[in-house]
């Protein structure tokens, strides 16, 4: 998933930033052109001209600009940190034994001996700070921040001036796939989000300069008690649902090898397990992303997912199908063929799914295979005419696929077309029997047909449904390659969930929000956020881990395709908003917004502009509810690009 750098660039500086010096004393690039000198800023930018790591001190030469690119005079405060690269990783020791740090303030009551901040010419400063433990040509992370003193100069965003190559195996992109645009949020240390000298976010190095590879609690320990690897490994273990720290690829962009420090291993594994095997494992130069993935079965699941795809045929009438139900023999049925393709070769090859289904393929075991027939109207799924529990399967005409058939269809869908969905779930070696939450599941949707007569169905185009998220929107966090429940996987932006959570299926979702989008919004940032978080000692609901993310940054899931005017103007059945009352409907934009913005005032605003969460549908399926248009006019003011567009209050552009 991509990250959003635009906000950081605006916060950091108006002029471009570049690496303009190095520790060999060479000059960097030219600074800003001469011009007006200002003595105050709202936004402060730094352009490093030169830096040097010397015996006992560091020196940085830089110019300071405001948001319009003008040079700034009167700077009276600068902060610097140098976290040394050691055999145990990055360490900034508070006692001054490794690395160094400090702040220079022009009018400090107790000036630091050897520290100085001088303006050599307009806007160009030389900052020197003593660090007794530092030696010339030491490697480490050099960090700089200026402003925020008595002068009216805003505190700049932290700048990573330099860092060693391959000093960390994680990357900003990995962190920002969840913690999008961290600096603009209200979470811990948001103001410490750093940029590099090109103006790009350097989230990991900005954290690592304080949250070192060695804890403050250890001998010659680092700056903070919590190491960065503890934050990454341990602090994420409280993520409630289908997250595993054993899927190291989620965070580590580069191979992970043992490097002489087994502290990281001991944070998760018992010392008795780590010590005997550490030397052997470190000699083998194993990429521990692969090792953890293999142990946890994540790699097996990923391999299986990459091997197969499924295909679901358009609904057809099979006059030869028969089954008994309620002491009645039904002859003829509405069927869809479920096919499995091996895509590891140059061309997809149809696999013998029927033999797998019957348990006749050695080494392959299916946990589930099934299919539904859906009503489809206005690019939306409007319910399920296939009767629940009344179905049977047989070998399809091609001898390899499974035909899944229903003897009749429920009433109430005369105004809708028909399409089908299927799910196939493979057991992996760590599969557990629990509502098909485990295993590797594949979902596919069929083309659309129109039912002209009982046994006559004609093609009506491809199945299309607006899904304004990306393929990895869910798997970035829910990363263990399993399912939420009922063989509904997190892959492809949760597309498989739509087979049940749609306009017409009317799921309760624990009385949080209806449909798919509203339910996801609610479970992450609305009322549903407390449904899975458990309760504290006093019985109060606990928010789940999604509350730790910045809900304003919708790009964690969405991409730039979001458009309110593109949402089909039709109702969503909404018993989730009414404690199970299945006679109610909600207009679609209101249903989504109310999932998070659920105050009386917010709902009142929506209702005054035609939105509703309680339109009357009536009991049963009259077959017309999904043909009715709603009166909501939200897109008039709130569509992206409008004067009060949702993009003014939420971040959608990556």
Image (tube, grey):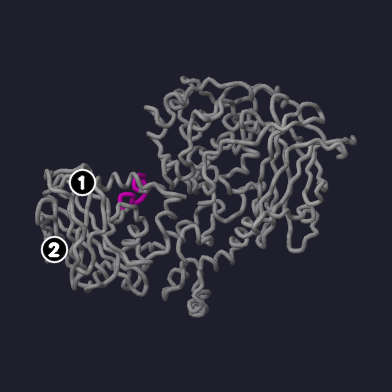
Of mark 2 and mark 1, the one earlier in the sequence is 2
Q: Is residue 388 left or right of residue 239?
A: right
- The residue carrying pointer 1 sits among few (fewer than 14), some (14 to 19) or many (20 or more) residues within 10 Å by Cα, namely some
Residue 558 locus on image (x, y percent):
48, 41
Residue at (45% x, 73% y) in the render: 258
Q: Dot 1: what SS?
A: loop
Query: Which of the 4 image quadrants contains residue 37?
Result: top left
Residue at (60% x, 43% y) in the render: 495
Q: Which residues are magenta?
A: 183-192
Distance between the Cα atoms at labels 2 and 1?
A: 21 Å
Front residue of 529 and 517: 517
Read off the residue under disc 2.
Answer: 115
Q: Are marks 2 and 1 in contact (CB under 8 Å)?
A: no
Read off the residue under disc 1.
Answer: 154
Query: Which of the 4 image quadrants contains residue 454?
Result: top right
Tell whether position 189 is magenta.
yes
When the figure is inspected, residue 205 is found, relative to residue 386, above or below; the finding is: below
Is residue 150 visible in the rendered image? The answer is: no
Is residue 244 visible in the rendered image? The answer is: yes
When the figure is inspected, residue 264 is found, relative to residue 340, above or below; the finding is: below
Q: Dot 2: what SS?
A: loop
């Amino acid at each position: 998933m991509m990250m959003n750098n635009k906000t950081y660039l605006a916060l950091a500086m108006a002029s471009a930033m570049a690496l303009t010096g190095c520790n060999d004393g060479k000059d960097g690039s030219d600074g800003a052109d001469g011009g007006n000198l200002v003595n105050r800023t709202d936004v402060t930018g730094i352009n490093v001209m030169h830096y040097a790591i010397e015996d006992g001190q560091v020196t940085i030469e830089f110019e300071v600009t405001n948001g319009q690119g003008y040079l700034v005079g009167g700077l009276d405060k600068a902060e610097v940190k140098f976290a040394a690269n050691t055999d145990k990783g990055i360490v900034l020791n508070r006692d001054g034994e490794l690395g160094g740090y400090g702040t220079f303030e022009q009018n400090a009551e107790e000036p630091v001996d050897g520290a100085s901040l001088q303006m050599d010419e307009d806007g160009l400063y030389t900052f020197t700070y003593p660090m007794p433990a530092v030696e010339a040509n030491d490697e480490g992370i050099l960090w700089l921040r200026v402003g925020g003193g008595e002068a009216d100069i805003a505190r700049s965003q932290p700048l990573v001036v330099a860092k060693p190559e391959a000093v960390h195996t994680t990357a900003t992109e990995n962190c920002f796939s969840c913690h999008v645009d961290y600096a603009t949020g209200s979470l811990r240390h948001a103001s410490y989000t750093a940029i590099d000298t090109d103006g790009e976010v350097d989230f990991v190095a900005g954290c690592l300069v304080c949250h070192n590879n060695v804890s403050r609690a250890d001998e010659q320990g680092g700056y903070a008690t919590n190491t960065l690897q503890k934050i990454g490994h341990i602090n994420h273990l409280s993520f409630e649902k289908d997250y595993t720290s054993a899927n190291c690829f989620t965070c580590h962009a580069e191979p992970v090898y043992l490097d002489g420090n087994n502290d990281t291993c001991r944070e998760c594994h018992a010392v008795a397990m780590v010590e005997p095997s550490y030397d052997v494992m470190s000699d083998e130069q194993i990429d521990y992303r692969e090792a953890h993935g293999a142990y946890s079965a994540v790699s097996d699941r990923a391999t299986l997912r990459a091997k197969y795809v499924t295909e679901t045929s358009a609904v057809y009438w099979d006059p030869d199908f028969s089954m008994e139900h309620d002491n009645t023999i039904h002859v003829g049925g509405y069927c869809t063929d479920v096919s499995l393709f091996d895509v590891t070769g140059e061309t997809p090859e149809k696999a013998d799914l029927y033999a797998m289904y019957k348990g006749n393929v050695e080494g392959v075991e299916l946990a589930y295979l099934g299919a539904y027939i859906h009503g489809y109207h206005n690019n939306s799924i409007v319910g399920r005419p296939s009767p629940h529990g009344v179905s049977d399967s047989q070998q399809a005409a091609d001898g390899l696929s499974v035909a899944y058939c229903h003897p009749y269809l429920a009433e109430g869908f005369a105004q809708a077309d028909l399409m089908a969905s299927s799910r196939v779930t493979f057991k992996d070696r760590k599969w557990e029997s629990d509502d098909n939450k485990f295993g590797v599941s594949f979902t596919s949707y069929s083309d659309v047909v129109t039912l002209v007569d009982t046994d006559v169905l004609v093609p009506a185009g491809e199945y299309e449904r607006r899904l304004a998220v990306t393929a990895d929107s869910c798997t970035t966090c829910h990363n263990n390659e399993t399912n939420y429940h009922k063989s509904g996987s997190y892959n492809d932006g949760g597309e498989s969930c739509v087979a049940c959570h749609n306009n017409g299926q009317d799921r309760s979702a624990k009385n949080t929000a209806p449909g798919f989008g509203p339910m996801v919004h609610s479970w992450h940032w609305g009322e549903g956020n407390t449904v899975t978080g458990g309760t504290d000692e006093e019985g109060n609901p606990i928010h789940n881990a999604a509350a730790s993310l910045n809900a304003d940054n919708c790009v964690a899931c969405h991409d730039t395709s979001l458009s309110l005017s593109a949402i089909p103007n039709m109702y969503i059945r909404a018993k989730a908003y009414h404690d199970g009352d299945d006679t109610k409907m909600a207009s679609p934009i209101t249903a989504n917004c109310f999932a998070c913005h659920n105050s009386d005032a917010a709902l009142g605003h929506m209702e005054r502009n035609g939105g509703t969460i309680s339109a009357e549908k009536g009991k049963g399926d009259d077959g017309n509810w999904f043909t009715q248009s709603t009166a909501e006019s939200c897109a008039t003011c709130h569509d992206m690009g409008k004067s009060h567009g949702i993009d003014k209050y939420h971040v959608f552009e990556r």
